[in-house]
Amino acid sequence: MDGMSDRRTALVTGANKGIGFAIAEGLGAAGFQVAVGARDDARREVAVERLRAAGVDAFGVALDVTTDDSPAAAARSIEQETGRLDVLVNNAGIAGRIEDDAQDPTTLDLDVVRTVLETNVLGVVRVTNAMLPLLQRAESPRIVNISSDMGSLTLRTGPILAAYAPSKTMLNALTVQYARRLAETKVIINAACPGYVATDFTGHDAPRTPAEGAAIAVRLATLPDDGPRGGFFNEDGPIPW
Ligand code: NDP
């Protein structure tokens, strides 16, 4: 342990590929040391090496958001590495099974709902609560929850996915609950929609690049101290809940 350094550190969950990897690249370019949170050892190491090759000061952190132990162990390893955490980006997420009308509300597979909520909602709570003590030690701590406009009750956009879309609605509601709870602290939390991004998640059939999707997360991770709290944003501005 080298104690508290001046270098700001950001943890990105699900950073081994897709939008999470691009957020890690973007935060690295913005001067952060990046903790690459990923559940698979080999995939995590490849990502760390790719980031280092691109000039990012990156280190790997084993992190599966679906267990209680893993986020706690990840917090201990980040504490040893840096003594604090400046930014947390809760990016890890899954769409859930869509075959056999599993996410048609009229034939909804409840096991798919449970699986999706475990990662997209409970995973965020586990990681956030494990990291909050480290975030509280930072000068300007920021939390960004990667949500989706599919979770908007107003926009009603995208395909009908009755497990995935409500998981993001709940994530948005949780973001507001955290923002209210943390209102008197330095910790600023917001939700971000990356837009429709070409990743494994979308079968790479989408108009935006991961870097374009990552931009709003990087912006919310580097908000000034008087920046918005408890909001829901894409790169054009606030999104209706
Ligand atoms: P990808 O499928 O490319 O990446 C998802 C990442 O999450 C992977 O690194 C994956 O790791 C990780 N992950 C999944 N489950 C867990 C877990 N239990 N523990 C730790 N990590 C996990 O998806 P995207 O990059 O497209 O999506 C990233 C986020 O952006 C998600 O939250 C998604 O809902 C959101 N989003 C994406 C949109 C898009 O158009 N792509 C649109 C709106 C929102 P592994 O490689 O091990 O599976």
Image: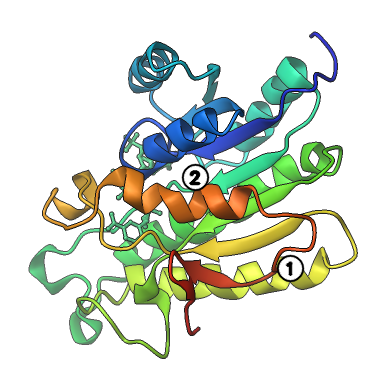
- Residue drawn 72% across and 63% down? 227
- Residue drawn 72% across and 38% down? 86
Tell me: residue 177, above or below residue 145.
below
Q: Secondary structure at mark 2?
A: loop
User: In this rendering, does residue 185 appear at all?
Assistant: yes
Amino acid type, callout 1: Ala
Counting from the top left corner in percent of width and height, residue 32 is at: 61, 29
Amino acid type, callout 2: Thr
Asked if ligand 1 lies within 8 A of label 2, the reply is: yes
Specify whether 20 is left or right of 200: right
Q: Secondary structure at mark 1?
A: helix
- The circle on residue 179 is 1
- Residue drawn 62% across and 34% down? 10
Specify whether 116 is left or right of 241: left
- The circle on residue 66 is 2
Q: How many marks?
A: 2
- The circle on residue 128 is none
Asked if ligand 1 lies within 8 A of label 1, the reply is: no
Counting from the top left corner in percent of width and height, residue 28 is at: 52, 28
Say which label, 2 or 1, has the lower sequence index.
2
Name the residue nearer the viewer: 11 or 115. 11
Disc 2 vs disc 1: which is toward the camera? 1
Counting from the top left corner in percent of width and height, residue 189 is at: 68, 60
Among the 4 quarters of the image, the one containing residue 48: top left
Counting from the top left corner in percent of width and height, residue 45 is at: 40, 15
Name the residue nearer the viewer: 67 or 10. 10
User: In this rendering, does residue 93 appear at all?
Assistant: no
